[in-house]
Image: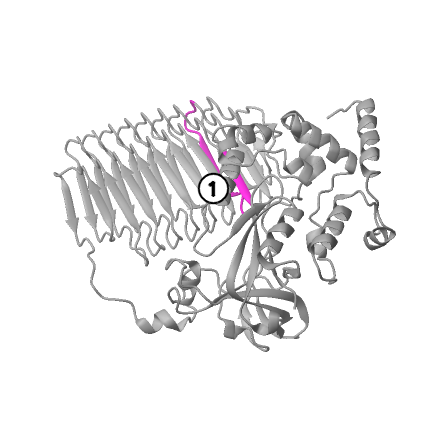
Amino acid sequence: MTIDRRIKLVFIFFLFLSVSCFSVSPADLSATKENPFTARASLVRYWKKHISNNLPKPSFLLSKSSPLSAVDSAIFTKLATQNALSSHLSTFCATADLFCLLDSKSIIENLKNDANFAHYTNKNFANYGSSGLGGVDVFKNYSQGVNFATGSFARYSDDSTGHNENFAGYADDGNVASSDFTSYASSATGGEGDFKTYMPRVNVPDLRFTSYDSDGNNHKLSFTSYVDDTNSGNQAFTNYAKNGNGVPVEFANYGDTSNVVVSTFTGYGELGNSANDSFKGYSTNANNPGNNFKNYGIGGNGGTDTFTSYRDSANAGTDTFQSYGKNSNTEKTNFVNYGNSFNVGSDTFKEYAKGAVGQMVGFKIYGLNNTFKGYAKKGVTFAQYTKPSGSSKDDSMKVSGKPVNNHVEEGKFFRESMLEEGTVMKMPDIRDWMPKRSFLPRTILSKLPFSSNELSALKQTFHAPENSTMERVLMNAMVECERAPSQGETKRCVGSAEDMIDFAVSILGHNVVVRTTDNVKGSKQDVMIGKVKGINGGRMTESVSCHQSLYPYLLYYCHSVPKVKVYEADILEVKSKAKINHGVAICHIDTSAWSPNHGAFLALGSSPGLIEVCHWIFENDMTWTTAD
C-alpha cells in the first residue's frame, strides 16, 4: 500500500493531539522501558488499571500484543471505518501480523513432458498436463511441514491419454492444507491417479474434487493412507466421475485415526457406466467421522460399490446415503463389516436405490442405529445384520478411569492422582499448530464485522470467495463463537488482550492471575513429574480457560470452568531428572454434564460424572484463576 506522505503527516499530527490529552507517568515509562504509545505499553497500563494485585505481568500475554505502530494503527482504523481495508489487505496482514490467504501462488507452465516435483511448496498447476499423451508426473514431499499448504490442480490432465499422476508425501505435518482439483482429469482416457500418504497429520485439511474425472474413460484413481491422523477437515467430491466410463476408484485406509473429518460425495459417478468404487478401511479408528453420499451413482449403469471394514473401530460417526444409486441399472453394492464402531454411530438411508432396475444390495455384519426411508424393497439382503445384544459394558471399567487403547493420544487426559512427584507419564504433543498471529488493537477490532449476519462483509474484508478455505475458516469460527453456552458455562470470543482481561475479571474479580505451560519440551515423550503446587491450596475453585481459534487475527474462545483444581508442576527428564519444563494442568472435578463420547472417557474407560479428568494447558492456551 502506498500512502501519500502528506496523509501520514496528518495522522501523526492528530495522533500528537490525541496523546497530549493524557499523561504518561514516569513510573509507567520505567515499567515498560519502551515507547509508551505501543500496543504492548498500552496493555501494561490497562493491566495495572484493571488487575488489583502487583504480581509480575504475564510476558506470554504481553508478547501477543499488536506490532502496529500508533501511526499504522490510526491509518488502519480509518480504513476499517471506511470499509476500505479489503483494498489494502496485503499490507494490513503483513504489518499487523495476521493470517491471510492471498492468491500469490506462482503458476507452473503447462509442460507436456514428464515432471518430478520434489520439495515444491504452494504452486498453481492449472491446466498442467492438459491434452498430454502418456507419461507420468510425480509429486513427492510436496509442501511438507509448512504452516499453510495450498495447491491448485484445476483442469490438470484434462483430456489426456494414458497419463499417470502420483501424489506421495503430499503436505504432511502442516496446519492448514488446501487443494483444489476442479475438473481434474476430465475427459481423460486411461492412465492413473495415485494419492498415497496424502496430507497425513494435517490440522485442517480442505480438499475439493469438483467434476474430477468427469467424462473420463477408465482413468483409475487410488487413495491410500489419505488424510490419516488429521483433525477437523473436509473433503468434497462433487460430480466426481460424472458420465465416466469404467472409472475405478479405490479408497484404502482413508481418514484412518482422523478426528471429525467430513467427506461429502455429491453426484459421485452420476450417469456413469461400469463404475467400480471400493471403500476399504475407510475412516478406521477415526473419531466421529461424517460422510454424506448424495445422488451417488444416480442413473448409473452396471456399477459396483464395495464397502469393506468401513468405519471399523471408529468412535460414533454419522453417514447419510440420500438417493444413493437411484434410478440406476444393475448396480451392485456390498456393505461388509460396515459401521462396527465401538461407540454406536448413526446411518440414514433415504430413497436408497429407489427406482433402480436389477440392483443387488447386500448388508453383511452391519452396525446398529440405522434408518431406512423409501428404500428399494427388492434386491436387498441383510445377512448377520447386527442387533442390540442387551449386554452392557463392564461397570468396573466405567468407574476405573484406567487408560485404555482407544486411539486417543496417550497422555492427553489423565487422573488427578498422576500429579504426584516421581510419577512417570506420557506427555502429549502440546505444541501449538496454529499459524502465528497477533491481537488487533481495539480501535480496529471494533470496526470489523464479527457475526454470521455480517458474513458477506467479513468475506469481502478478508478476500474469502465462495467455497474457499478462508470462507471455511471464518464460518467455523462464527459457529464456535455463536454456539449456545453449555449448562453452567459463560463464554466469549475475544480478539484483543483487553477484551480477555475484561472477560476474566467479570467472572473472577479483579484479583486474578493467568498461567500457561512454559514451553513444549517433553512433548510426545515419557516425562517425570517434579515438584507439584496446587493453586489456591489445591482446593476446588473456578477458572477461565482460553483456547485459540483459527482466524485471521489472534482469536481466543474463553469460557468459565467451575469446579476445577489447577496445578503447577515441574516437568523432568526421566533419566537425568533435569527440569525441562514447568507445566500447568487443570482437573475437571465435575464431569457429569460431559458427553459420553468425550475423548476423556474414551481414553480413560469411564463415563460422565464418575471420574475427574485432568489435562495440560497446551502451548499458547491459558487459564485464569483468582490469585493465591
Q: Is residue 578 above or below residue 352?
A: below
Question: Of residues 546 and 628, which is closer to you in this image?
Answer: 628
What span is in magenta? 159-179
Q: What residue is shown at x 73% (from left), y 35% (from top)?
A: 73
Give the amino acid at mark 1.
Answer: Val
Q: What residue is shown at x 59% (from left), y 29% (from top)?
A: 461
Q: Residue furthest front?
A: 21
The spot of residue 238 in percent (x, y) is: 38, 31
The spot of residue 547 in percent (x, y) is: 56, 52
Q: Which colour style is shown?
A: one colour
Question: Of residues 238 and 55, which is closer to you in this image?
Answer: 55
* Quadrant of the rendered image containing residue 609: bottom left
Quadrant showing the C terminus: bottom right
Q: Is residue 309 above or below residue 590?
A: above
Q: Residue furthest left?
A: 378
- Residue under numbered circle 1: 479
